[in-house]
Structure formats: structure tokens, C-alpha cells
Amino acid sequence: MPLFDLQITIKFLLRKLKNCAVSLTASIILVDCYEVAHAAGETLSAGFLFDEFDLTLEPGYRAEAAGPFFYSEKKDSEQTLAVPPFFSVNQNTVIHSGELDLLYPLLTYEHYTDEWRFQLFELIAFAGGRQPDEFQTKRFTLFPIYFQQRSLDTNQEYTAVLPFYGRVKNRLFRDEIFCVMFPMFSETRKRDLVTDNYLYPIVHVRHGDGLHGWQAWPFVGSEHKDVTTQTNGFGDVTTIGGHENSFVLWPFWISQDDGLGTANPEKFRASIPLFSITRSPNRDATSVIWPLFTVVDEREKKYHEWEGPWPFVIFARGEGKTTDRVWPIFSRSHNQTQESDSYAWPFYYYKRTHSDPLDWQAARVLFYLYVGVTERNTQTGAEKLRRDAWPFFTWRKDFNGSTRLQILAPIESVLGNSRGIERNWSPLWSLWRAEENPRAARSSRSLFWNLYRRDTEPDHEKISCLFGLYQHDTDGEKKSTRLFYFPLVKP
């Protein structure tokens, strides 16, 4: 199929998906029927077949059917409709955003106000929206072969069929890339630095603001940059240091002089792997049989470090850093704001960052077999907690004190807080769910997708089990019991 016909076909599919998203969004309105019935006290409890209930952790409402294979949820301005794991659609009417997932993460569609993006497993992608210059743009990517952008601003348009011919802008970590039969020739630009590559990465020529250089790698190369100035957004003039770099038979001889014209010029000389030497007012480092044995004197950061053989044995002492490492047996390192420890790596690993008002701590056992994360506000004392034991459970506690426990959790402990996983996959294996909202004095329990469910709130308790064949409702002093959907005890 010609590339042009392929693009037309994909655009056609995209329009169909967008129409599908609209239809699914309209289906969410059906939840309003449940809300009306719920307000009138006519809720239906027949889990696992069908169940409807108030949300526990926040104001809202949810209906579930066919066990884990359908749910519809509405809270504040956000609505979600899902048939896990096949698709889910989510919309927020306040911030005008939405997401559509089909077999997540295979195909996703997202939009936020005027910006939107559609992707098929990160290989085929469409995107559009308004740029900061207010021009409407549209992108199409068939990674890593075809890149296209169209815009009302013709200066922002590009087309590239890599590696044969084309130009791309603001992609692949460069402001602009132009190539002809890559690696025969390519030209890249990042800010003012332009590099012309011939038989990449062997020969290149560079030029920029006060800069010129060339190389015939790995034989010889040289680059020089003058000291220049730059005016920031506040009108202040800052100095941009120059440099003088060269090599001969890389890495046999490397010479680099950086930060010229600044308060911290740095000289680096190396013949890899024999030695490397760094000298500057702030830092000295000497390596023998690079990078195995190194001595570092960090005068600015106020510590001395001895490495050998790196990265297995490291010792550091000083105000800025203290480290004792004999890897993988043990490793302890800390300074005024950070700490990291490990014992019998990867059996136990601990990391902490303390910078008021944030105190963040994380511990892991055997990678993700157990994960514990604590985030504390040192001013208020409020804590946000996460505890995972793969693949058995995941437990969360937010700053308001609300908690949620899920059993099982084969992916959540590895990927953390992924909205796509939570919407599309978590319902499939959530055998047990327990939620607590202490501020509202509300709680809920669900086993085997509402085959047993219990909801409590002040002066009210509701229990349902075995497809709703048994139901018990307590509202203050009023009690009602149903067996096989027939009332035994009337309120």
C-alpha cells in the first residue's frame, strides 16, 4: 500500500475512533438514570451480576455489571465508562479533557482543550492543537520512518521519510533535523549550534555563536568556542563560558578546556583507559586505569572521595557527602538532604529525600517484591503512604487519611499510579477491595466483584451477597432484610 493511501486509511480510522469516543461518552449519561433511582432509594444490588453504590473515598456514584467486565462511574466533573480490558473512555467537563483507551496501552486517544493525540503502541501517532504562536498544527508519525507536520504557519511544516530524505522540527531531542540518505548526510540544530554530519558519526563540521569545530572520528578532531554573553528574560546579561576541545586517535588522547572566561574553568586530559585528570578551582579528580581507580576532591561540595574498583568500592568523607560502599554487600550514602542505603543488593534498597516541607522515603525488597513509599509534609504532619507486595496486594493512603486496599496487584506495584492500568486492567484481578474514608466515616468492602459487598456510613449499613440473594440494610433504627429478593424484615 502506498504511504499516502496508508495515511488516508489511518486518518479514516481516527475519525471513526473519535466518533466512537463521542458515542461512548453519550453512553455515560445512562448513569444519570441510576442516580435518579439511587436518590429515590431504588438501588439494585445483584453483584456479581449488577451493583450500584456511592463512592467511598470521594463524592460520586458507580455501577458495575458482569463482574469485572463493565463499570460506569461519575464523580464531580469526571465520568468514566469501561469494558475492561477492551476499552475505557474518561471525560472531565471542567478542564475539557478526555481519554479513550482500546486494549491499553495498544491504542490511546487523549485530548486537552484544543490539543489532542492518538497513538497505536507509540509506532503510529497523530497529534494536533494550537502552538504558543496560536497556529493550529497537525502531526502524523509512523515511527521511526515517516514524520509529518502541517500548520497554518508554513515555517513549522515538515516532511521526512527516514533515513532517505526529509526535515523534522522539534523532534528527537533536536530543534531541527535534515537528512539525505542518512548516514551519508544529516544536519542538526539545537539552539544556535548547527552540526553537519557526513557518514555519521565519522565526519562532522560544527558552527554556532562563537563556535566552530570539526572531526574525523576516531582519528582527529578539534572544537573552539569563544566566551559569549546572553540576555535573559529579566534583562540581565550572563556570561556563557567558552571551551577548547580536541582529540587524537580517540580515546588515546582527549583534551578538553571548559568554562573558559568563567569563575570555574576546568581542564580535562585523558588517555583511556590509562588515566584521566580533571582540574578546576572547585574540583580535582584523578583516575588510573579509568574508570576503576579514582580520587576526587570536591572543594565546592566539601567532600573527598576514593573509588576503587569503581563502582563496587567507594568511600567518601566530608560535609557534602558521606559514603561507604562495598557493592553488593552493603552501601550507605548521605548528605544534608539525601540518603540511600542498600544491603545484599537487590535484597534491600532504601532512599530518602528531605527538603522542607517534603520528606520522601522509599524502600524496596528484591526489586518490587515489596515496595514501601512514605511522603510526609513536615509542616502539617500529614502523610501519604504506599505499600505493595507483588503480586499479592497494593495499599494506598492519601494526605486526608483515606485508604484503599486491593488484592491482587500483579502490575500496580511495578508501575505505580498508572491511570490507564487502573481503568483498564485493575478491575480484572481485584478479588478484594477495601476502602476507608475517616473524614466522612464511610467504608466499603467488596469480594469477588461484589459477590459480597458491605458499605457503611454514619447510621447506615448495607450488606449484599450471593448475587443479591441475601441483602440486609440498616438505617438508624430501621432494618430491612431480603432473601431471594423477598422481604423478610420490613423497615
Image (cartoon, rainbow, N blue to C red):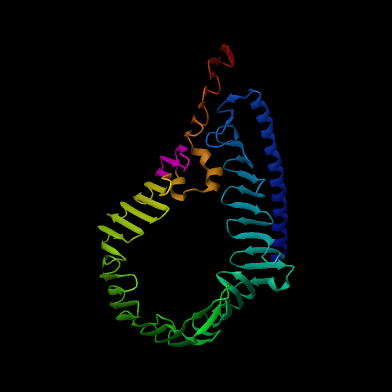
Tell me residue 404's x, y (percent).
47, 38
Q: Quadrant of the C terminus?
A: top right
Q: How many numbered marks are there?
A: 0
Question: In the image, 58: left or right of 341?
Answer: right
Tell me residue 13's x, y (percent).
70, 53
Q: Is residue 407 magenta?
A: yes
Tell me residue 282's x, y (percent).
35, 77
Q: Quadrant of the N terminus?
A: bottom right
The structure residue drawn at horizontal position 53% and vertical position 29%, both measured from the top left corner, is 450
Splitting the image into 4 quarters, where does residue 85 fall? top right
The structure residue drawn at horizontal position 60% and vertical position 75%, both measured from the top left corner, is 177
Question: In the image, 171: left or right of 223?
Answer: right
Splitting the image into 4 quarters, where does residue 386 fall? top left
Q: Is residue 338 magenta?
A: no
Question: In the image, 356: left or right of 444?
Answer: left
Splitting the image into 4 quarters, where does residue 77 fall? top right
Task: Residue 411: tell me if it is visible.
Answer: no
Which residues fall within the magenta stretch? Answer: 383-409
The secondary structure that dominates the magenta segment is strand
> On screen, 473 above or below 159?
above
238, 454: nearer the viewer: 238
> On screen, 25 above or below 33?
below
Tell me residue 362's x, y (percent).
38, 51
Task: Residue 323: tell me if it is visible.
Answer: yes
> On screen, 243 above or below 478?
below
127, 476: nearer the viewer: 476
